[in-house]
Image: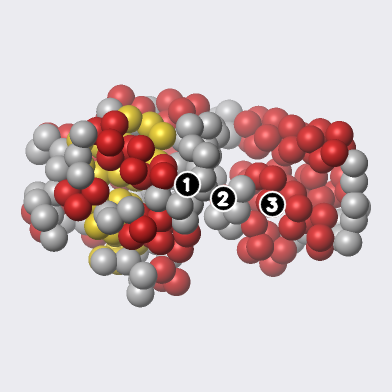
Amino acid sequence: MDKIQAFLFDLDGVLVSTEHNHFVSWQHCAHLLGIPFSQKENELLKGVSRIDSLKNILALGNKQISTDEFESLLKIKNDFYLDSIKHINQSNLLPGVLNVLTVATKKGILLGVGSSSKNANLILEKLQIKDFFKVIIDGNGVKNPKPDPEVFLNGASALGVEPAKTLVFEDAASGITAAKNGGFNTIGVGNPHIAHLSDIYLDDLTQFKLETYA
Ligand SMILES: [Mg+2]
C-alpha cells in the first residue's frame, strides 16, 4: 500500500447509523400503501437508492401507482426521515469515529466524505463533525451511483490525492466495489459480509490504527 495521504468515508454505516430512521420512514410509506413491511423486507432496501427502494416496496405488494403518487411518496419518505433525524447529535457517531477524525487531522491527512445520501451535509452538521472534511461529495453531486467509482474519484480529485494514496472506508459491498473500481485502498467496517471484499476489515473504528497506514 502506498503511503496514505487522504481518507474518504462513506456516511451511513461508517460514521453514523441512520438505518433505523430509514426503516421507520419506509415502513410509514408501506403502511400508506397497505403493504406489510418489517425488518425482513427492509433487508431488500439496504444500500439501495430512494427511487429503487420505493420500486422494491411496490413490487413486494404487487402494486402499481401513478408517477405523481410515486413522486409524492418519495417526498413523504424523505420528510418523515428528515423529521426523524432532527434530534441526532454527536452521541450518534459510531464507536471510534471521533478519534480517527481527530488523529488523522493532526497527522495532516486530508479527509472527505463520499456518500449516496442527499442529506449528507445536514447529517454531518448535526453530528458536529462537518468541519473535519475538506470535501463532501453527496448524492446530489454524482450521476452514477456506487458501485460506479464516480463519488470517490470526485472526492479524491477535489482533495488532489491519487486513489492509490487514498483509503476508502465503507460498510456496503457496492461501496467497496466502487472504491476498488476506482483504484482505491479499502477498509471494510461493521459488516462481516464485506470482509472478503475489503483490503482490511474492522468490526468498528475503535480497531483502526493510523500508524499502519501513514
Ligand atoms: Mg453505508
Q: Position of residue 209 (x, y in %)?
A: 16, 56
Q: Is residue 161 visible?
A: yes
From the image, tell me which residue sits under label 1: 12
Residue 146 in percent (x, y) is at 48, 52
Question: Alpha-carbon distance for marks 2 and 1?
Answer: 8 Å
Question: At 87% from the left edge and 60% from the top edge, which residue is drawn?
Answer: 61
* Vertical position of residue 127 compared to residue 190: above or below: above
Q: In which quadrant of the rendered view does residue 199 lie?
A: bottom left
In the image shown, does 185 or 14 lie closer to the viewer?
185
Q: Position of residue 113 (x, y in %)?
A: 36, 38
Q: Residues within 10 Å of mark 2 (few under 14, many from 20)?
A: few
- Residue highlighted by disc 2: 19
Looking at the rendered image, the disc whose residue lies closer to the viewer, 2 or 3, is: 3
Q: Secondary structure at mark 1?
A: loop
Residue at 35 percent across and 74 percent down: it is 196
Residue at 16 percent across and 38 percent down: it is: 109
Q: Is residue 71 left or right of 173 when viewed as pictured?
A: right
Q: Which residue is mark 3?
A: 53
Q: Is residue 183 left or right of residue 59?
A: left
